[in-house]
Amino acid sequence: MNKKEILLHIKNALLNPIKGRNSMGCAEANYSPYYAIGNVFTKKELKEMTYIELCNLRKLAEYLSDAFY
């Protein structure tokens, strides 16, 4: 996956968040790594990041998504 594809996944996650809530009342969208990244950083910040930085963020967000789910 290249930088453009990662940014597209983030954009799509924000435009089409996962619907519903879990048994604790948390929005399911919050467990999406791409959705989380898109909510933490601005579009400008994301575009300025390198491919490696985006990959590292995605890796961290995927781990945390699993850990908190």
Image (cartoon, rainbow, N blue to C red):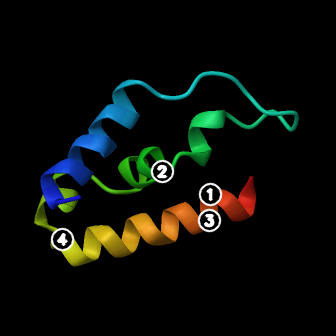
- Indicate the quadrant where residue 40 lies: bottom left
Q: Residue at x 41, y 49 (%)?
A: 34
Q: Residue at x 57, y 36 (%)?
A: 29
Q: Nearer the viewer, residue 5 or 23?
A: 5
Mark 3 and mark 4: Cα distance apart in space = 20 Å
Mark 4, residue position: 51
**Answer yes or no: do the residues labelled 3 and 2 have beta carbons within 8 Å?**
yes
Q: Are marks 1 and 2 in contact (CB under 8 Å)?
A: yes
Disc 4 to disc 2, how far (Cα)?
A: 18 Å
Residue ID for mark 1: 65
Distance of label 4 from label 1 (alpha carbons): 21 Å
Which percent across, then down, holds residue 62?
53, 62
Residues at circles 3 and 4 in contact by the CB criterion of under 8 Å: no
Disc on res. 64: 3
Q: Secondary structure at mark 1?
A: helix
Q: Earlier in the sequence, mark 4 or mark 1?
A: 4
Mark 2 highlights which residue?
36
Q: Residue 51: horizontal and vertical position, in percent?
A: 18, 71
Circle 1 or circle 2, nearest the eye: 1
Residue shown at the point (55%, 28%) measured from the top left: 18
Marks 4 and 2 in Cβ contact (< 8 Å):
no
